[in-house]
Image (tube, rainbow, N blue to C red):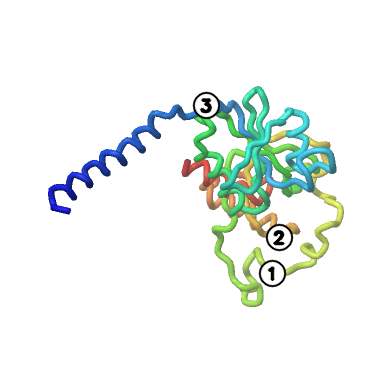
Amino acid sequence: MNKCFRRFILVLLAIGVCPAPLLAQLIAQPKPIRIKVVVVAMFERGEDTGDTPGEYQLWVEREHLDQIIPLPGGYHHVRLNKDGVLGVLTGVGTAKAAASVMAVGLDPRFDLSKAYWIVAGIGGGDPGDVSLGSAVWADHVLNGELAYEIDARQIPETWPTGPDSDSLRKARAPFAGFPNALKPPFVTHGDTLSSSTFRLGSKMDEWANAWTRYYTAGRGNYMISAMEDSGTMQALTFL
């Protein structure tokens, strides 16, 4: 086979291959689903419906989030209703929350350009500010993992936070002396310190309040703790 004929064959092959990507571009892509509200919950006890509810189940049942949509890049499938409300279950922990919210935010099936986001879950409260069953709308979400620590065995005695104490071991004692903790449930504004570390006791509450003041230049007031919120908000910030 001479060189000219080989070149002719290559040209034909190239012409035969090129239309394929052009054809793919001409295929109509499905229109993204317009999302009005994204409801983000973090954990569920069992199934999405029909058993003991965690944070997600009552949203699914009461908002009729009946359409199940697989989310390969996230922790759990998402659910949609006919009004454009999208339910997301992130899984427990900052890492799962960040990954799941990022997966939803980058999914081309959803148009989130006009969506409101509601991040709603259970958290621990500062008895100096809230009572059991209260609802806190957060003004700030702080990452409690970005803290500076020292091994408890080497903490100077003069430090006001960190060492073990009787108050930490009596964390389940009645909240006498905390007027706000004795009130009926109420709704308030405050700040969330997001951390994957479970903490108990008045000394740890003092630590949380101190770090909230540090990170907000004195503007914030720690009221409630959470695990996943900093991951969720970081993903939304990057998106």
Residue beneath label 2, please?
203
Can residue 96 be seen by looking at this rendering?
Answer: yes
Q: CA distance from mark 1 to mark 2?
A: 9 Å
Which residue sits furthest front? 1
Q: Are marks 1 and 2 in contact (CB under 8 Å)?
A: yes
* Residue 230 seen anywhere in this rendered image of the structure: no
Q: Nearer the viewer, residue 89 or 110?
A: 110
Q: Residue at x 65, y 72 (%)?
A: 152
Residue 223's disc is: none
Element type at marker 2? helix
| 226 to the left or right of 132 | left
Image height check: is 33 above or below 199? above
User: Residue 237 location, x and y as percent?
Assistant: 49, 42
Q: Quadrant of residue 65?
A: top right
Quickly name the residue at label 3: 114
Of callouts 1 and 2, which one flags the residue occurring earlier in the amino acid sequence?
Answer: 1
**Of the pair 165 and 51, the residue shown nearer to us:** 51
Q: Is residue 198 above or below residue 113?
A: below
Residue 165 in the image: state x and y as whole percent.
Answer: 76, 67
Kind of residue at badge 2: Lys
* Residue 82 higher or lower than 58, as above or below: above
Q: Residue 189: image x %, image y %?
A: 65, 36
Q: Residue at x 74, y 28 (%)?
A: 64
The residue nearer to you, when weighing 196 against 84, is: 84
Label 2: few (<14), some (14–19) or many (≥20) C-alpha neighbours in 10 Å = some
Q: Earlier in the sequence, mark 1 or mark 3?
A: 3
Query: Which mark identifies residue 163?
Result: 1
Q: Residue at x 72, y 31 (%)?
A: 66
Contact? badges 3 and 2 (CB < 8 Å): no
**What is the three-letter code of the residue carrying label 1?**
Pro
Q: Amino acid under label 3?
A: Lys
Distance Cα–Cα, label 1 vs label 3: 48 Å
